[in-house]
Amino acid sequence: MNNINLKWIYLFALSLIWGSSFILIKKSLLGLNPYQLGALRIIITGLFLFAIGYKTVKTIKPKDWKWLIISGFLGSFIPAFFFAIAETEIDSAVVSILNSLVPLNTILLGFAVFKITSTKRQILGVIVGFIGTAILILKGAHLNPNQNYMYAVFVILSTVMYAFNVNIIKKYLQHVKPLTIATGNFVAIFIPGVVVLLFTDFFSKTTFNNPEFKMAMVYITLLSLFGTAMAKILFNKLVHLSTPVFASSVTYVMPVVALMWGFIDGEGFSFLQGIASLIILLGVYLSHKRKG
């Protein structure tokens, strides 16, 4: 199968997995606080990656560790907590919509910091996708007037970190295999994740006696294995196969999946949001660079 077809397969597989992760965060928060959720997500993911990728750690060159550590904190550690904090106040579908700022930030940072050029078509695709995202945000705010949108700052900051991360992988870790990158990331952030968990009162009767605790652990395990571990490997592969802009455009399709889960869970969804979702898909198509 050629790279063009593989790019699209990875894109939509990631959209399904990551689009479902927002509802899993929401459900996990019923039995965990956001700091416990973020720490457990890092620890469970790390254990899984160590089990399947420990042999790859020996292949990492000393000069690559700096970028793997930075990538680990920007692409996994900090966002794991920020997204959980955001979802204590904002619906899961709206958080996924705000996450669609990643491609725009990827282009801006790629050009300003990493000197990675983008085509006019890619820029047009990002603009079109951003318009669709803006419609979704405005309509979401209209449907949910009681939500504290100040918490959107946590998501926006995460999108900047994701944009840095995808450009770092493309520019400095292109020669490193996807599983190796993911494993190296979690080697760097695993111990900090354990330290955070120890300070969250997770190992207390209050946490364990919560009637939602057991199901929360099921949700966080699914989130860690699929929404983080598997998705990280697929995403790193997508970055290798395509451009940073196309890889980050996965965040344009994710809201469509997240909105469907939100609708099933009782969150609002309107006809205009459906139209906005189609505009987003058009943006993804335009941002796809056929060469390179």
Image: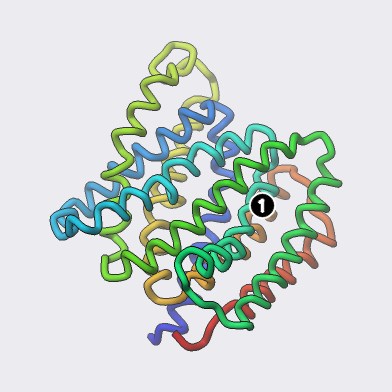
* Amino acid type of the residue tagged 1 in the rendering: Leu
Q: Where on the picture, by quarter, is residue 26?
A: top right
**Is 79 on the left or on the right of 41, as rendered?**
right
Percent coordinates x, y for residue 167 in the rendering: 44, 64
**Few, some or many residues within 10 Å of mark 1 (<14, 14–19, 20+):** many
Q: Quadrant of the N terminus?
A: bottom left
Check the image and report above or below for 56 versus 11: above
Residue at the image point whose x is 32% and y is 70% from the top: 174
Label 1: which secondary element: helix
Residue placed under numbered mark 1 in the picture: 98
Percent coordinates x, y for residue 67 in the rendering: 32, 55
Check the image and report above or below for 208 versus 232: above
Residue at the image point whose x is 62% and y is 48% from the top: 156
Q: Nearer the viewer, residue 262 or 136?
A: 136
**Is 188 on the left or on the right of 226, as rendered?**
left
Q: Where on the picture, by quarter, is residue 121?
A: bottom right
Residue at the image point whose x is 70% and y is 65% from the top: 130
> Number of callouts in the render?
1
**Is 140 on the left or on the right of 127, as rendered?**
right
**Is 269 on the left or on the right of 107, as rendered?**
right
